Image (cartoon, grey):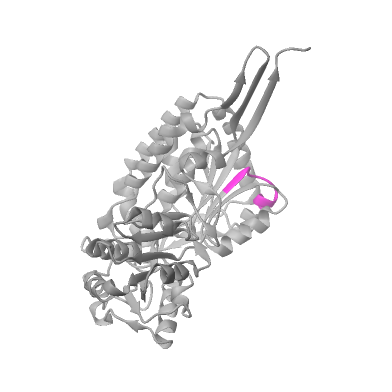
Amino acid sequence: MSSVLKCISPIDGSVYAERPVATADLAREAIAKARTAGKLWAKRPLSERVDLVLKGVARLGEMTTEVVPELAHMMGRPTRYGGEFGGVNERASHMAKIAESALAPMVYETSDSFERRIEREPHGVVFIIAPWNYPYLTAINTVAPALIAGNAVVIKHATQTLLVGERMVRAFTEAGLPEDLFTNLFLDHATTEALIKDRAFNFINFTGSVGGGAAIERAAAGTFTGLGLELGGKDPGYVMEDADLDAAVATLLDAAMFNSGQCCCGIERIYVVDSLYDAFVEKAVALVQGYKLGNPLDPETTLGPMANVRFAKEVRAQTAEALAQGAKALIDPALFPEDDGGAYLMPQILVDVTHEMRVMRDESFGPVVGIMRVSGDEEALALMNDCAYGLTASLWTKDATRAAALGAQIETGTVFMNRADYLDPALCWTGCKDTGRGGGLSEIGYHNLTRPKSYHLKKVTK
């Protein structure tokens, strides 16, 4: 008998959904069907592929009233914030808009003697292993451009958001996408690794932990399968002396605490120049004290439970270690009596922190942020780069030239000025160091989801 995947709701610890794990044989059969469907799909005009993908996105959007409480039950995000379909639409629409130019042949000669060009060809079957924290947004980053480019797509979603892949496939199929082209599979780790080792896929996109990314690289070793890996993050914010203080506090603290801190590019450490430090901390504390922790189905709740008890346990451990090493907690636990020692975790601001503490080095992925005082750009730069990860960095200043010069020295994938925790679909979403490799969205995203093929056609025989 096959095993079963269970989604344990962080609301009350109950089993919210369960699905049987596909056997290796059933998975291989589904992938073979996807490959066949993909070959026919790739022959269809680009305009038809774009149209059907956008119809799939639209159909998904029509399910919002079902999806919002479903997400609250699965991973704890408060229903007051709605679904993820504003971002889903923005990203899919942009990738549809640029498809023709991004996938256009690069023509170097068309003469009586020669045709010389480079074309973009779909990989074949793209395998997406999607995370639970923004389950629709992270998935659509690859689903939309992969399909538009002419690939078939197989999606495996995180167990914590077990129903998302199933719902996405249903929406796209109902919108008219060909049968078997977009397939959801419920897989365990062993079968997933076996399929990768067997070269079942032509490209793999994974968003998740560093350990998960390393496991995929090991499984793919020697197969020459293309990989896109977005792994960990410990994104910094730096507030300079000319920053708009109120805007910096509001944006950076929201980026640290929204979704209970479970954001790939959330802010996990903040460095503030001496002259603004005290005022920044005071305003930050006042802001966080106003949050309401509770059941995500309650419209008054602004901070829901973390997606899983084990995630909350890690944040509590980092915080406790920091306090034992001399850090100071500024948020009174008495303000958040709903913190139950389980998935419900109060927000916390730590000061007197150092980079000797795990909370300033390791990914927390929860509602805790450390704030450090710095003397200026040189110290801030050294601290921002003193990290194993490199996804985004948020700089706060009125001087774009200064921000760009500083950004050029930061080891990161994206540099923000006066913004944080946002993904611009026109720009490549990428990282460095332990954050992974590859890049999604933008024209570069299409390049990663296709392979170049060169044509050198000599028209004369002499």
Which residue occupies the foreground of this view, 293 or 454?
454
Which residue occupies the foreground of this view, 57 or 225?
225
Q: Horizontally, is 67 left or right of 462 in the view?
A: left
Across and down, in percent, residue 387 comes to 50, 68
What stretch of residues is rendered in magenta? 194-204
Question: Residue 451 is drawn in which quadrant?
Answer: top right
Residue 243 higher or lower than 113, as above or below: below
User: Which residue sits at x=48%, y=80%?
Assistant: 356
Q: Horizontally, is 293 left or right of 445 in the view?
A: left
Q: How many marks?
A: 0
Residue 146 higher or lower than 25, as above or below: above
Across and down, in percent, residue 372 comes to 37, 75
Which residue occupies the foreground of this view, 278 or 49?
278
Q: Horizontally, is 19 left or right of 285 in the view?
A: right
Query: Is residue 203 found inside the magenta-colored segment of the image?
Result: yes
Which residue occupies the foreground of this view, 452 or 46?
452
Question: Residue 364 is drawn in which quadrant?
Answer: bottom left
Q: Is any atom of residue 265 visible in this view?
A: no
Across and down, in percent, residue 4 comes to 53, 59
Q: Residue furthest right?
A: 462
Say which quadrant the N terminus sits in.
Answer: bottom right
Q: Is any atom of residue 432 visible in this view?
A: yes
Across and down, in percent, residue 3 comes to 57, 59
Say which quadrant the C terminus sits in.
Answer: top right
Query: Is residue 414 found inside the magenta-colored segment of the image?
Result: no
Residue 363 higher or lower than 435, as above or below: below
